[in-house]
Image (tube, helix red, strand yellow):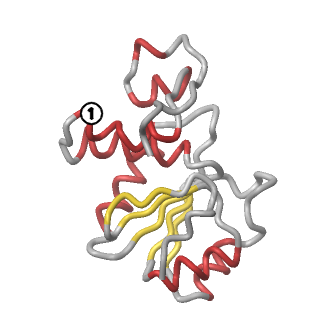
Amino acid sequence: MSDPEHIYHWRRVDARLTTSGQPSETELAQLKQMGVTYIVNLGLHEHERALGDEATSVTDLGMEYTHIPVAFDAPTTADFDRFCEVMGRTGEAMVHVHCIANLRVTAFLYRYWRDVLGTVEEDARALMDSVWRPGGVWATFIGDTESEALEHRPPVRGKS
């Protein structure tokens, strides 16, 4: 099956990791057909674009589900620590990580790759830069002190 690139801000990271904004019920089934066995959601269930009962939808499809509700205006170290724990236990599973718009996810993955896996800065930042360039609390969250006083910015051109 081909990648469901129609999902908002869809990104294939590698053979076992994909990310996006909020998938629909139909798109969750497409992810299952692709071989995804683990869904991680960093969005809030209360958001207007969130699914009514995503946990049940995912588990009914036979996939595992973890919800780490990250407030967009206040990401925390505890949220990041939980994310690291979850990513560490997914092993070789095919994982799809999403939030509402793939902003939280790409910032978390940037920090995870840089701080936990020791990925080179430019490589760690490429996925995030293809979706957005954080300012404010998100710049603080990722340790980008130069961007803390800035608004969020659009993606870097030329990134996919």
What percent of the width, then of the height, locates residue 61? 59, 87
What percent of the width, then of the height, locates residue 76? 49, 37
Camera-side residue of 104 and 2: 2
What percent of the width, then of the height, locates residue 50? 73, 60
> In the displayed structure, would residue 27 be above or below residue 33?
above
> In the displayed structure, would residue 26 be above or below residue 133?
below
Camera-side residue of 124 and 58: 124
Residue at (53, 88) in percent of width and height: 62
What percent of the width, then of the height, locates residue 95? 41, 69
SS at mark 1? helix
Camera-side residue of 159 and 17: 159
Q: How many residues crowd around disc 1 within 10 Å: few (fewer than 14), some, or many (20 or more)?
A: few
Q: Is residue 74 left or right of residue 115?
A: right
Residue 35: image quadrant is bottom left
Residue at (58, 80) in percent of width and height: 30
Q: Which residue position holds label 1?
A: 122
**Which kind of residue does numbered mark 1 sit on?**
Glu
Q: Is residue 49 left or right of residue 118?
A: right
